[in-house]
Amino acid sequence: MKNQQNRGEKEKTKKWRHPRYFIVIRHQPHQLSLSLSFFYCSLQPQTTHPFISTSIPCQQTRRAENEEEEDDNNQDPPPAMKILRTTVFLLLLLLASAISTSGFGSMGPISAAFGDDGFFCAIDASGKQEVICWSKNNSSPSSSTSTSTSTTITTTSSASTSLSSMDTPSQVPPMAALSGGEGFLCGILANTSQVFCWSLVASGMDLVPSDYKTTAYSYIASGRNHVCGIRGAYYSDHGYGTVDCWEIVKSSNNTLSSKQSTLFYNETINNLAFKKIVSGEGFSCGGIREGGLVCWGPNSDSLGVSNVSKSFSVLASAKGSICGILDSSREVKCWGDSDSFSGCPIGVHFISLTAGAYHFCGIREDDHGVECWGSFNFSSVPKHSGFMALASSDFTTCGIREDDLVLDCWSRNATLQPDYNPPLELCSPGLCRPTSCLEGEFAFNASNLNEPDLTSLCVRKDLQICSPCASNCSAGFFLSSPCTTNADRICTGCSLCQNSSCWDVCGLQPSSQKNWHHMIRLAIIVASCVSCFLLILLSWCFLPRMFATKPEEGTKKQFKSCIGKPDQLDGEATADLFPSVSVTSCPGTAQIFRLTELKDATNGFKEFNELGRGSYGFVYKAVLADGRQVAVKRANAATIIHTNSRDFEMELEILCNVRHCNIVNLLGYCSEMGERLLIYEYMPHGTLHDHLHGGLSPLSWSLRLKISLQAARGLEYLHKEVEPPIVHRDVKTSNILLDSDWGARIADFGLFTSSEKDLDLSGDMKSDVYRFGIVLLEILSGRKAYDRDYTPASIVDWAVPLIKQGKAAAIIDCYVALPRNVEPLLKLADIAELAVREDPSERPTMSDIVILLQQIVKDGLLL
């Protein structure tokens, strides 16, 4: 009887098979319930379908089918059941075609909404905790149906700006933290700790149920279509609270609404106190007060999280998996769909995590570099850059760089451009909190942004941002200063490595080996010079004198136009001193470049094209379509934020009129899509700093005197001949570049022009004179302006007393062979001493310095 009953029940449970899907239909008395099992069997077991994933291997699915075949052989279902099965299967196919990938990250200063209506948002670094949002590009590589634009939307608490994509214009208030779901984003309000949720594409703003609208939350986590929050004031330090969850519902007309959740209600969970939580697709997980990790929700069982007693500092969730950073070891542990965390780094310590649809990315503890794993092309991850925070959408990850707080995004596929192009805005490096920083953390100092009125990045003065310290540097850099309570470690380029403390890190040779190589190099140079001298002597003896007349005049004219005045220097002697000097014709009217043209010329502003970075922004080497090599200076967010369009246009008018052979001249500019790009002449021999201190080819005394005079003439031109006069304010060896003929060019003077509002223009010019005096001391001694390896560290404090005591010879660079006549070098020391005098009224003008240096150059002919 029992067997008959079992057979009867079995007859009511049928499976209809499809080559790739199977459906389980159970018919029970008095009701019809459908239990659908939907599996995808890949031809290659390790391949993940872009829309459907499962943790059940295809072999298990086939085995289950075979078992059913044995029981159900030769049994035909009734016609009504056939129709029902066919209908359900078609519905499932329709559902499969509508599924979009999604992944979810934990709460932070930057977050992403997923899916076709995805967008990114971040908290800005203005000190007001305002929100910056940007949506997908016009042509998204991962979603061809996306219609959103790449327009950046900045939301404020006081301006009348509205989110135009919403049905009801509204403002996103200042936020303390952000967390993204599918097509929506939620945040904790900076002033009230209440939750506020919104979307840039889908309409509907009532995304928090009325029962929870006035509740304060200390932590939130958005899943695919639900949100969970930990009760408690965000800025309190108690840290634990109970959890509320609600669902986000999307209607057929693309409208979002919210409702209280029954799927995520669990009486046991409601009695627990949580520290932090994360939400994914149909599940939420969190760390509890007693220690350990618990998960709940309809899909939580598929994760396999059970009996986890360890605590986690950070949690992040992908589509069907979760990873966390262990408190004890800072290593990563993951559960769920193993494809999304395959290749997880072992033995690497992390401080932050984020997750896309099928990948994870984390910030390393040692050098703040980024590592990604799962279904991800690792070559797309930025190299040689540290990050403070990360967030991921389906296929794009964006981060806040630690050196300048600018956003950077990259795709999981290195051959495709990211779905999102971030705006040039400064973003908050972390979340504001009331507690003091712990050991191994530093308090971010807002003064590093060089904004006079900015004292904190938080809305309240009792708050601060604590970030984990780094202990190492990326490849090509060495640790020059460790982390302190108010600043992270400082990394310096290996080109500036000067002592044994950084030799091993930079892979440099000891000084004894260097000296041996220098001796070999010197011998080769001497032999070459002797050969050249003999060749010149033979040419002078045998070539007709009349044949040499015209070239000599040409050389004389070239030198006079760039170095001296027509009646001040002897052209023949000058030609001997500087045999290869030539003048590049000054460019004409500035050219307007297209942004696409410059992107192509710089390979998309990639790091390997970067020449350097300064107060204005980044400088890239570019090769234009016509083959010209130029330098492209790209403004950073701070420059764009604090320079309006009118000021930029006025500065351009001045820069376009600056034309001199000892200035790095402006060739053109681009101001499309909010970008501000300046295109300059390319200087192939780098900076004076690189040759004096960076290990590049040493400079002879003749060349050093020439560079001193040419740099002085460039500054004289800015002070005296430009209208209105330009005060450089940042004269240093790294801002003196060397062109193809080793001519000196003054750089980085743009966007620092003086105006009538300057109270003491002559005083500012005297500041330029002082800094130029320091440059002369560096040229003369080979020492840096400030070097902790010496006592005193300041070059002025060290050199000036010796010069005043008549011991200027003691500061001359001993690594360059001394000339027979050192008198010009001693005179150069006297000029430097005049320029760095404490009383500005005792300093000469740049015109005075030019006259003095011209006389030294004439005397230097005897070197």
Image: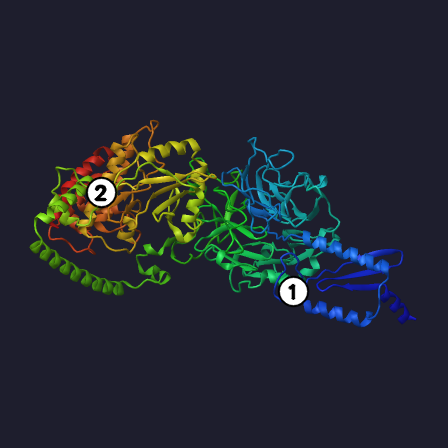
The mark found on residue 30 in the picture is none
Secondary structure of the residue carrying tag 1 is loop
Quadrant of the image containing the N terminus:
bottom right
Which of the pair 737/466 is nearer the observer?
A: 737
Residue 95 percent location from the top left of the image: 71, 53
Residue 72 percent location from the top left of the image: 82, 69
**Residue 859 visible:** no
Model colouring: rainbow
Which residue, given by chain and number where applicable, does mark 2 sit on? 710
Q: Residues within 10 Å of mark 1 (few under 14, many from 20)?
A: some
Q: CB atoms at circles 1 and 2 under 8 Å apart?
A: no
Q: Earlier in the sequence, mark 1 or mark 2?
A: 1
Which residue, given by chain and number where applicable, does mark 1 sit on? 42
Tag 1: residue type?
Answer: Ser
Q: Quadrant of residue 767?
A: top left
- In the picture as drawn, the residue positioned furthest to the top comes out as 756
Q: How many marks?
A: 2
Secondary structure of the residue carrying tag 2 is helix
* Left or right: where 730 falls relative to 109: left
Tag 2: residue type?
Answer: Gln
Between marks 1 and 2 in the image, the one whose residue lies nearer the viewer: 1
Residue 487 percent location from the top left of the image: 43, 48
Which of the pair 778/537 is nearer the observer?
A: 537
Residue at (10%, 49%) from the top-left corner?
547
Q: CA distance from mark 1 to mark 2?
A: 70 Å
Residue 750 percent location from the top left of the image: 34, 38
- In the picture as drawn, the residue positioned furthest to the bottom comes out as 70
Q: In the rendered view, would you say 652 is above or below 16?
A: above
* Left or right: where 333 falls relative to 770: right
Q: In the rendered view, would you say 851 is above or below 309?
A: above
* Left or right: where 454 falls relative to 501: right
